[in-house]
Image (spheres, rainbow, N blue to C red):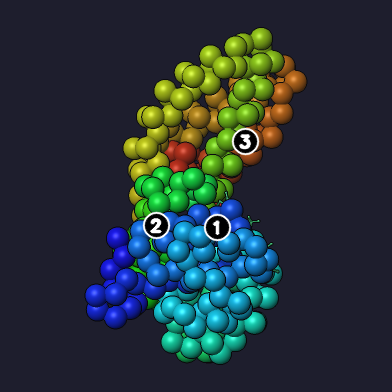
């Protein structure tokens, strides 16, 4: 419920939302429904009307909306839209806390933080992991980074939107987390599609295999954790077995794929990395040790 994060004692907290697309509208509606004094602005004015009906105030310009609340949540299409809107806001942002939930890169987040600081504002960057119906539930995850003071002051308001995690004072860190988590999904799922192609080429039932695979992956979390620790420490145990044993299996996997006309590019990459580690004298180490060939350590 609305507290007093950014209003007078006893009064409902104020929040401004810039951008009322599919995501921004639900964010604004959530704040209104939970008792926040919500001011909204959108480039196309018509999108504010349903929120005004619920009790939000509609501002004529983005600068006017920013003036209405200390906490300003930005949820626009992309960074080009954010650039345009922030240009129009200019010095009105002084003394405000900008929470930019627009998708974008770590470098863009850091540039927005500089922009905000130059104008006397604080900046938090956030990335939305979830869909509009998830807003206001634990299914929406919101990695945030940037000003710790701003995070601590407004955490309870931001928690109205979903699960919140603070990733540190580097404004780019939330975007790094977002990119890494999204990439993990794609990296795993393209591998899964390659495997389904293999099952399909052998005349197998891909749906039945997928069901068995779903049970299989529940065993992976401990392996992910131990690989993370091995990579952090640079100390690689023979996880999944010693590389010299695994490499022999790789030959079979590549041959099998090629024999049924299925792309073997990923298995060849794994085999190549294993061969290089073995040639460097690390054949007794495990799968995690391939990281040593992938990493560009700072
Ligand atoms: P959307 O429905 O397409 O809405 C885009 C918003 O950006 C609208 O308010 C639009 O204003 C505004 N906009 C676009 N260009 C602009 C410009 N040049 N100047 C001012 N305003 C501009 O997108 P959305 O779904 O709300 O997504 C918003 C952000 O949330 C995106 O960064 C998206 O990646 C992220 N996100 C969305 C989802 C999702 O499922 N929707 C999930 C996770 C993250 P007009 O109404 O005037 O066009």
Which residue, given by chain and number where applicable, does mark 3 sit on?
190
Res 24 quadrant in image: bottom right
Residue located farthest toward the front when viewing the structure as drawn:
53
- Secondary structure category for the residue under label 1: helix
Give neighbour class at mark 2: few <14, some 14-19, many 20+ (Cα, 10 Å). Answer: some
Labels 3 and 1: the sequence-earlier one: 1
Of the residues tagged 2 and 3, which is closer to the observer? 2
At x 50%, y 54%, the residue is 26
State which quarter of the image contains the N terminus.
Answer: bottom left
- The front one of 114 and 259 is 114
Labels 1 and 2: the sequence-earlier one: 2
Which residue, given by chain and number where applicable, does mark 1 sit on?
50
- Give the distance between the C-alpha atoms of the residues marked 2 and 3, in whole angstroms: 40 Å
- Tell me if label 1 and label 2 are in contact, CB under 8 Å: no
Which residue, given by chain and number where applicable, does mark 2 sit on?
33
- Give the distance between the C-alpha atoms of the residues marked 1 and 2, in whole angstroms: 12 Å
Residue located farthest toward the right when viewing the structure as drawn:
261
Report if the beta carbon of the residue with label 1 is closer than 8 angstroms to ligand 1.
no
At x 68%, y 76%, the residue is 84
At x 47%, y 66%, the residue is 56
- Secondary structure category for the residue under label 2: helix
- Tell me if label 2 and label 3 are in contact, CB under 8 Å: no
Q: Position of residue 4 (x, y in %)?
A: 28, 73
């Amino acid at each position: 419920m609305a507290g007093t994060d950014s209003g007078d004692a006893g009064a409902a907290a104020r929040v401004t939302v810039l951008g009322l697309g599919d995501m921004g509208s639900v964010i604004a509606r959530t704040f209104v429904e939970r008792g926040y004094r919500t001011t909204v602005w959108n480039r196309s004015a018509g999108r504010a009307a349903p929120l005004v009906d619920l009790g939000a105030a509609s501002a004529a310009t983005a600068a006017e909306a920013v003036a209405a609340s200390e906490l300003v949540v930005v949820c626009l299409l992309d960074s080009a839209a954010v650039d345009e809107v922030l240009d129009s806001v200019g010095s009105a942002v002084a003394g405000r806390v900008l929470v930019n939930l627009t998708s974008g890169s770590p470098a863009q987040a850091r540039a927005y933080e500089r922009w905000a600081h130059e104008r006397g504002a604080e900046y938090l960057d956030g990335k939305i992991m979830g869909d509009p119906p998830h807003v206001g539930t634990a299914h929406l995850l919101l990695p945030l980074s940037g000003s710790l003071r701003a995070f601590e002051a407004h955490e309870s308001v931001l928690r109205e939107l979903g699960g919140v995690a603070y990733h540190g004072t580097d404004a780019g860190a939330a975007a790094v987390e977002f990119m890494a988590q999204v990439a993990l999904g794609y990296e795993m799922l393209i591998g899964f599609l390659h495997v389904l192609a293999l099952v399909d080429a052998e005349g197998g039932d891909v749906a039945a295999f997928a069901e068995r695979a779903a049970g299989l992956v529940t065993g992976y979390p401990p392996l992910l954790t131990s690989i993370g620790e091995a990579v952090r420490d640079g100390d690689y145990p023979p996880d999944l077995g010693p590389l010299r044993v695994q490499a022999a299996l790789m030959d079979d996997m590549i041959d099998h794929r090629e024999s049924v006309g299925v792309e073997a590019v990923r298995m060849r990459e794994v085999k190549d990395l294993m061969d290089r580690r073995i040639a460097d004298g690390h054949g007794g180490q495990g799968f995690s040790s391939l990281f040593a060939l992938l990493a560009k350590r700072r």
